[in-house]
Amino acid sequence: MEPGRYTVILEPTAAGMLMLRLMGDLNARPADEGRSYFSRPGGGNRIGEKLFDERVTIVSDPAEPDAETASFTGEGLPIARTPWVVNGILNRLAYSRFWAERQGQPPLPPPPNLIMSGGGASLEAMIQSTERGVLITRFWYIRGLNPRTLAYTGLTRDGTFLIEGGQVVRPVNNFRFNQSLGEMLKNLEMLGQPTRVAASENSSVGLPIVVPALKVRDFHLSSVSDAI
């Protein structure tokens, strides 16, 4: 199968592996310094701007059932439920103690877990609604490319399938992807029910990540890979 821009359906684990990377980008300092997707042209950050599809809400909460974490950081800062993105609008960014003092803001720890809102679509309904696309199970070797665009690259793994006429018809070769997570979260077509996933590349439990399956248009599968 040739590389290109495809409608893709990301199973929850694949979606979670990408959203895990987004957690580290929710940081005020690189945004304020002009080094981030969340930097405002001319200076400052984009808190308060609508950046993603309006169905995207992302929170962290140490008391979330089945995604519990410590309620304080190693420095002793309390961790409370925090809405990072609300209906597609950037709501908060993390502030270290140093950067909070520099900017005159209260410190805010980075997200200890990630809970993303979903929709009512089943994986089967996503497949049935797709005339031609690719079903992706997992990724690996995910690396950052450009923090200004939230661009990441990586490889598909453990099951990549062609969808035609609303059905999974055959397995296909693996791909390398080059994709902006910001564009991905703008190009959502359908969302499934949020579920807890193991989002690390080695399948260890890792940080609690609760995300839905995602149907996304124009996902950039940039080249064919021999990965297995």
Image: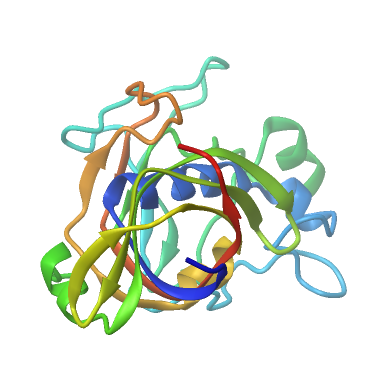
Task: Give the residue at x 32% y 23%.
Answer: 205
Task: Give the residue at x 52% y 44%.
Answer: 23
Q: Position of residue 94 (x, y in %)?
A: 59, 44
Residue 104 visible, this orientation: no
- Picture layout, residue 83 above or below residue 76: below
Q: How is the model colour-coded?
A: rainbow
Task: Give the residue at x 15% y 71%.
Answer: 121
**Foreground residue among 207 and 30:** 207
Residue 114 visible, this orientation: yes
- Picture layout, residue 57 above or below residue 73: below
Task: Give the residue at x 82% y 75%.
Answer: 41
Q: Position of residue 190 (x, y in %)?
A: 27, 75
**Foreground residue among 53 and 112:** 53
**Foreground residue among 35 and 203:** 203
Q: How many marks?
A: 0
Is 14 positioned to the left or the right of 90 in the image? Answer: left
Q: Position of residue 201 (x, y in %)?
A: 46, 30
Q: Which of the 4 image quarters holds residue 11?
A: bottom left
Is 228 positioned to the left or the right of 158 in the image? Answer: right
Quadrant where the C terminus is found in the figure: top left
- Picture layout, residue 19 above or below residue 218: above
Is 21 positioned to the left or the right of 189 in the image? Answer: right
Q: Which of the 4 image quarters holds residue 68?
A: top left
Q: Position of residue 49 (x, y in %)?
A: 58, 76
